[in-house]
Image: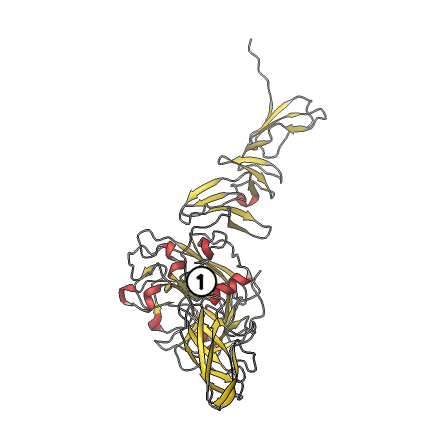
């Protein structure tokens, strides 16, 4: 004889039998759950982990299986489609691909098949982001003067470190040797502020000022004590050929592994914090390193825009740019210490320099996105940036600052001053950086000189400017014995030192010269 056990059943989500006898079984179809009435006549579910049901309510702490993965409820979940925001995946899955997995959960691992890094999806309590999962030493980098750190190659002798893969120098705007925090009215090309960021103005009158922590901007991006600020000084309608922009040039050796201009060119990602008193879409451009010198078919430009929807609010921007697979070695010098890539932020350049074609590599001399917001068109408008990072792959990882000494050294590879820290070049009444004194000579006109040494080997042979230690006059050396400035001269300038000399204009039995200097090997 075949027997059958009759169980209670319900098709109402959350419904459990009450008032039944201990030992009676029940099934709830809506919740995909079964259970038994316990000794106190209460319904007790027997299966702790069920398949997710669209009809069920779930409380914090309950477990379900969804799409083959185990999840724990972290927020009360009403009936409906599975909402990843309400669940935490138990143990991480591992994905492999050119792009990051969608809807990752804390602990999810991803091997970036383009950038060659392993990432983990990490939540620090405030935000979630991909972070490098393994700290290892990077590949051997080029040696000698071609590296951003002088004789040790890019990022030292270990190449681009996976812990700090940023190709941008001074991306957090900490170093400002040129102006020491003072703002600059931009009236020409190549005015630096802060270090490694050059501002351009092709019109006769200054249309904007630029500065580290510009006073007009009173808030800072989260976690960044410094920023680069810009403020418009007029309501300027740009003429067709006007150039009003800021750019950052990257050495070819420092982006060569991205393979731009080859069939295997890698995508790369640019991220930064930005804010403006204006709202809308702002211009951002990547240019090939040879664009400024070769032109024509060797101009390779990728123009796009980024949105700042709320005025005076710092916004995190992420832009992923596909690799330029059009084979052109002339456009992209992927080795050497000259320009390899140019990063451009436009403030109001004219129509001749604007391109209507966005989000695609093209051959054009235009470096600004047509239709973007012009900061210089509104008098008093401001714009700011910090945390600028450019890295291989399609994911923006957190900005990791260099230690202060390393950060300064990276900038001194391109520009260094003999002045004490915090002193602007040209300051008056400063002690000499390099000094020569000889006594007991005949009372005739004498010349003398000495050698000044750099703290960091330069990218290339630098341009030297001497300064009088008393008056701060450029191109001069102080004749201390006679209390006058004399014309300075340099010779045998190398990447790690230079020789200087001067001639007395007043006869003296003592030769006593002193000077300060700057050395520029900017690109």
Classify the position of the C terminus by image quarter.
bottom left
Classify the position of the N terminus by image quarter.
top right
Number of on-image labels: 1
In the rendered view, does 202 fall on the left or right side of 429?
A: left
Q: Position of residue 504 (x, y in %)?
A: 47, 87
Of residues 191 and 502, the one drawn nearer to the viewer in this rendering:
502
The residue carrying mark 1 is 150
Image quarter of residue 199: bottom left
Characterize the local packing of mark 1: few (<14), some (14-19) or many (20 or more) Cα atoms within 10 angstroms.
many
Q: Residue at x 56, y 78 (%)?
A: 431
Image quarter of residue 296: bottom left
As helix, strand or loop, the secondary structure at mark 1 comes to loop
* Visual colour scheme: secondary structure
> Image height check: is 275 above or below 21?
below
Q: Position of residue 414 (x, y in %)?
A: 44, 68
> Image height check: is 273 above or below 35?
below
Q: Position of residue 104 (x, y in %)?
A: 50, 45
Of residues 460 and 296, the one drawn nearer to the viewer in this rendering:
460
Of residues 195 and 124, the one drawn nearer to the viewer in this rendering:
195
In the rendered view, does 415 fall on the left or right side of 10?
A: left
Residue 273 shows up from this direction: no
Of residues 463 and 433, the one drawn nearer to the viewer in this rendering:
433
Residue 482 shows up from this direction: yes
Q: Position of residue 194 (x, y in %)?
A: 50, 70
Q: Residue at x 32, y 65 (%)?
A: 290
- Residue lying at the far top in this picture: please name it: 1
- Residue lying at the far right in this picture: please name it: 40
Image quarter of residue 44: top right
């Amino acid at each position: 004889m075949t027997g059958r056990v009759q169980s209670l059943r319900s098709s109402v989500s959350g419904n459990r039998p009450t008032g039944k006898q201990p030992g009676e079984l029940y099934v709830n179809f809506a919740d995909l759950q079964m259970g038994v009435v316990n000794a106190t006549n209460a319904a007790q579910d027997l299966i702790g982990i069920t398949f997710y049901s669209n009809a069920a309510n779930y409380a914090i702490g309950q477990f379900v299986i969804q799409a083959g993965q185990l999840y724990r409820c972290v927020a009360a979940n009403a009936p409906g489609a599975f909402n990843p925001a309400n669940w935490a995946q138990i143990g991480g899955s591992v994905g492999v691909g050119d792009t990051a997995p969608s809807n990752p959960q804390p602990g999810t691992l991803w091997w970036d098949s383009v950038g060659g890094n392993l990432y983990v999806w990490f939540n620090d309590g405030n935000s979630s982001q991909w972070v490098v999962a393994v700290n290892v030493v990077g590949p051997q980098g080029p040696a000698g003067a071609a590296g951003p750190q002088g004789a040790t190659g890019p990022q030292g002798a270990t190449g681009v470190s996976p812990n700090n893969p940023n190709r941008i120098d001074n991306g957090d705007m900490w170093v400002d040797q040129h102006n020491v925090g003072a703002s600059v009215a931009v009236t020409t090309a190549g005015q630096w502020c802060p270090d490694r960021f050059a501002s351009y103005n092709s019109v006769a009158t200054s249309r904007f000022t630029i500065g580290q922590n510009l006073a007009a901007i009173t808030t800072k991006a989260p976690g960044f004590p410094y920023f680069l600020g810009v403020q418009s000084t007029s309501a300027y309608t740009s003429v067709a050929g006007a150039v009003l922009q800021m750019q950052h040039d990257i050495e070819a050796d420092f982006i060569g592994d991205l393979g731009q201009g080859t069939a295997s060119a890698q995508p790369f990602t640019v991220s930064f914090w930005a804010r403006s008193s204006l709202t809308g879409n702002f211009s951002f451009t990547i240019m090939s390193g040879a664009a400024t010198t070769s032109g024509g078919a060797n101009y390779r430009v990728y123009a796009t825009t980024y949105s700042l929807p709320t005025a005076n609010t710092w916004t995190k921007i992420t832009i992923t740019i596909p690799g330029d697979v059009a084979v052109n070695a002339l456009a992209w010098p992927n080795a050497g210490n000259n320009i390899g890539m140019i990063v451009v932020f436009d403030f109001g350049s004219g129509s001749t320099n604007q391109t209507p074609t966005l989000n695609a590599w093209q051959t054009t001399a235009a470096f600004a996105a047509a239709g973007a917001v012009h900061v210089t068109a509104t008098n008093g408008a401001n714009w700011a940036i910090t945390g600028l990072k450019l890295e291989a792959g399609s994911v923006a990882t957190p900005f990791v600052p260099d230690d202060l000494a390393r950060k300064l050294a990276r900038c001194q590879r391109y520009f260094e001053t003999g002045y004490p820290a915090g002193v602007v070049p040209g300051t008056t009444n400063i002690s000499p950086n390099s000094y020569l004194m000889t006594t007991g000579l005949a009372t005739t006109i004498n010349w003398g000189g000495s050698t000044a040494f750099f703290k960091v080997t330069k990218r290339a042979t630098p341009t030297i400017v001497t300064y009088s230690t008393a008056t701060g006059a450029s191109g001069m050396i102080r004749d201390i014995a006679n209390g006058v400035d004399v014309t300075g001269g340099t010779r045998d300038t190398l990447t790690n030192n230079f020789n200087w000399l001067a001639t007395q204009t007043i006869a003296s039995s003592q030769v006593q010269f002193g000077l300060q200097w700057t050395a520029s090997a900017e690109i």
